[in-house]
Amino acid sequence: MEDDDASERKMRFLFQLRSRGVTDPRVLAAMERIDRGEFVRGQFAERAYDDMPLPIPCGQTISQPSVVGLMTQALETGPRDTVLEVGTGSGYQAAVLSGLVRRVYTVDRHRRLVTEAQALFDRLGLTNITAQVADGSRGLPDQAPFDRILVTAAAEDPPGPLLAQLKIGGIMVVPVGQSDAVQTLIRVRRGEDGFDYDELRQVRFVPLVEGLGQT
Ligand code: SAH
């Protein structure tokens, strides 16, 4: 019975993603392999397969699955890419990326989130992800440059250090706007001669905050 429930739940989860515009088969396959239920604990666990953001420790949120899918799709990853994610949170987005690229670096300003996410990556055998405590608004200079950068917290503008750490030919996806308003998801492509920007959709993320957190 349990197995029937689980496979029906998974089918519904994938159907929901497709109906909200996540159509890239590689992204859908990567999301099928990662169980969002592992990344949501406590009283919200039973909602893990609903298409909604949910609270996680440190006053943060795990993003809505369809938004994770759309952002991952917009990143146009390749199997040899090295990706920086800013905003580890629960680790779910990094786990989805881990199935699509060679290497994922993910940073968060809250130590507790990084420790818990890294423990989960280890338990799930996701060996190509490294989680680190860092102020991601400065990027990760030691590992730069990156093929892809995904920011999962809203900045007022695409942070300069992150633009500088993007390879030529690289893509960055970042929500831009005031933290308490609707924000716009932006895709930045770095060409030989500069940066091209396109606006993807309206989103709502917690703010990108400079400096490290207290916990
Ligand atoms: N990608 C996450 C959701 C992220 S919520 C997931 O899949 O669950 C946004 C995260 O960005 C929060 O955990 C917050 O602590 C982090 N954050 C905010 N500002 C930051 C900064 N300057 N550097 C690193 N992380 C930051």
Image (cartoon, grey):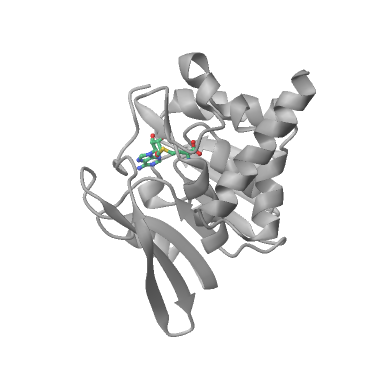
Circle count = 0
Tell which of 78 and 70 is nearer to you. 70
- Residue at 62 percent across and 26 percent down: it is 38
Position in image of residue 42 (x %, y %): 50, 14
Q: Is residue 146 visible?
A: no
Question: For the N terminus, which image quadrant?
Answer: top right
- Between 139 and 15, the one lying in front of the other is 15
Depth check, front residue: 99 or 166: 99
In the displayed structure, does residue 132 sit left or right of residue 157? right
Indicate whether 101 appears above or below 96. Answer: below
Say if 42 sits above or below 153 in the image.
above
Is residue 61 at least partly visible in the picture?
Answer: yes
Q: Position of residue 179 (x, y in %)?
A: 24, 45
Quadrant of picture, ligand 1: top left
Image position of 7 (left or right of 136): right
Up-down: is 139 above or below 158? above
Residue 72: x %, y % from top left: 55, 55
Q: Position of residue 169 (x, y in %)?
A: 55, 75
Residue at image location 21% in from the left, 47% down from the top? 181
Q: Which residue is depicted at the point 64% across and 61% down?
A: 24
Q: Is residue 159 above or below residue 16?
A: below
Identify the residue at image location x=55%, y=35%.
91
Report the side of 177 relative to 213 (left or right). Answer: left
Of the 4 image quadrants, the one containing the C terminus is: top left
Residue lying farthest top?
42
Quarter of the image for residue 118 reads: top right
